[in-house]
Image: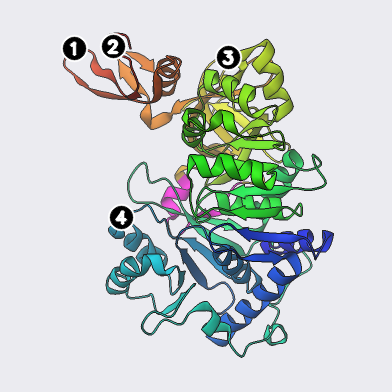
Amino acid sequence: MRAIDYFDRGHDRNPQRLAIVDTDTGLKLTFAETKALSLRIAAALQKGGFKNQDLLGLYGPNDGMLLVALLAMWRANGKWIPVNTRNAIDANAAYINYVRLEWMVYHSSKADEVEQLKALCPTLQHFVCLDKRLGDDPSLDEFIAGVSEADFVEPEIDAFGNLMDFVGIFPTGGTTGPSKGANVTNLGWGTMIETAADGMGGRTDDPVALVSAPITHAAGPISLSTMSLGATQVILPGFDAEAVLKTIEDYKVTHMYLPPTAMYQLMASPQIDKHDYSSLKIFILVGSPCSPEKLRQAVSIFGPAMCQAYGQVECPMIVAWFPPEDVAKYAASAPEKLASCGKPTRSIKVALLDDDGQPVPLGEAGEICVRGALVTHSYFEKPEETAEIRKFGWHHTGDVGKFDEDGYLYIVDRKKDMVVSGGFNVFTAEVEAAVTEIAAVREACVFGIPHEKWGEQVHAVVVADGVTEAEI
């Protein structure tokens, strides 16, 4: 199936159900209205010269129409280029030039940045502003004026749903330099959505998903996953702890996603005890390891909804899954298990390998390597880097992990972040976990610095409240 087919699956469940509620602009669209609007935008793109597998960038804060534009791009069988609103201009320009992006849909709040990108990125030629005309750039309303759903020309689709067409070129974390572009296929995207639906679905007949993390990052694919289940997307322009807490109660949110650092901000909010969170069924933590103690506390606050997922751009989102019923069970009976990211999902095979590609013994640390349909096709125009991460017939994540006797996977560190001190491997993530167990520490970052005697020495930077350096 194609990416857009998953939205259409949600549409077919109940076309008159609300699909999008934008709390900032007041926009409300049913699934039927969202589909119709996506067809018009896709037709307008085609009329403007957008071709099969062309690239389209989305740039702006969370907005209901940004999500509709994303759906329209996939309907036209285009490739999504997420443009990170938090990146410096030079970083975004470098990525845009690398993938040779031509089309951009942006929000007027990013007008100054877009003007700079126009000067820095010669391939960028087509611009549409979501909310108003800016200079020569039409507003979205102007762009689709005079175009109907009937004008849309369905791209050629094979019996397999164009499995090897690309849904996007997604920037990696760039831990070893500028971001590489991961070529993500319909096969990999669909595998991610189906796997996510396995974990998130069947928990309510009235799914409502809160979108406060950036749509132009992980919240975009998670939104498509929940839309395939027929979930209403309640969209905040960005993350604000008090707004998130209030919105959960006001809209009876059932599904939400945040990185652990944002969850910590929720828990530290003075409003945390003033709202009802009983509607929550799924509260996914993904993006970085979560403090086991804070996860245990979160269960006591948000109820048996807390869950964790592990993945990366090259094998999106859900290599491992720790479902809410198991998190709640271990929060009460074996909190040490909460350091895990869960068990491998049924869509992927996971092995822990040494540097020679051999499996490590149970309980020992090895690089997390994966194999299956979830794995992305390649890095865009980087065959050597692609070959490097596909040695021994596996995709190498660069993460170091351990399995316990029950099959739970624990992320120990990034392989490149490991500190070698006095001949011993020190996993920075383990030190960070220990430091964040201190109640007065909100966040910690651990790293190595050169040391004359030990080679490297472990250092920590913390966000603290009422604790001294000596106590840490």
Labelled pair 2, 1 in contact (Cβ < 8 Å): yes
Q: Mark 4, residues whose alpha carbon is within 10 Å: few (<14), some, or many (≥20)?
A: few
Secondary structure beneath label 2: loop
The amino acid pointed to by label 4 is: Ala
Residue extending farthest top: 471
Q: Decide: is 166 above or below 358.
A: below
Q: Which mark is residue 88?
A: 4
Q: Which mark is residue 363?
A: 3
Among the two numbered marks 3 and 1 on one chain, the one whose residue lies closer to the N terminus: 3
Among the two numbered marks 2 and 1 on one chain, the one whose residue lies closer to the N terminus: 2
Labelled pair 2, 3 in contact (Cβ < 8 Å): no
Q: CA distance from mark 1 to mark 4?
A: 38 Å
Q: Which mark is residue 433?
A: none
Task: Judge depth for marks 2 and 4 and give the one in front.
Answer: 4
Q: Does any portion of residue 49 appear in the rendered image?
A: no
Residue at (79% x, 48% y) in the render: 206
Secondary structure beneath label 1: loop
Range covered by the magenta-colored residues: 375-387
Q: Quadrant of the N terminus?
A: bottom right
Q: Which residue position holds label 1?
A: 453
Q: CA distance from mark 3 to mark 1?
A: 30 Å
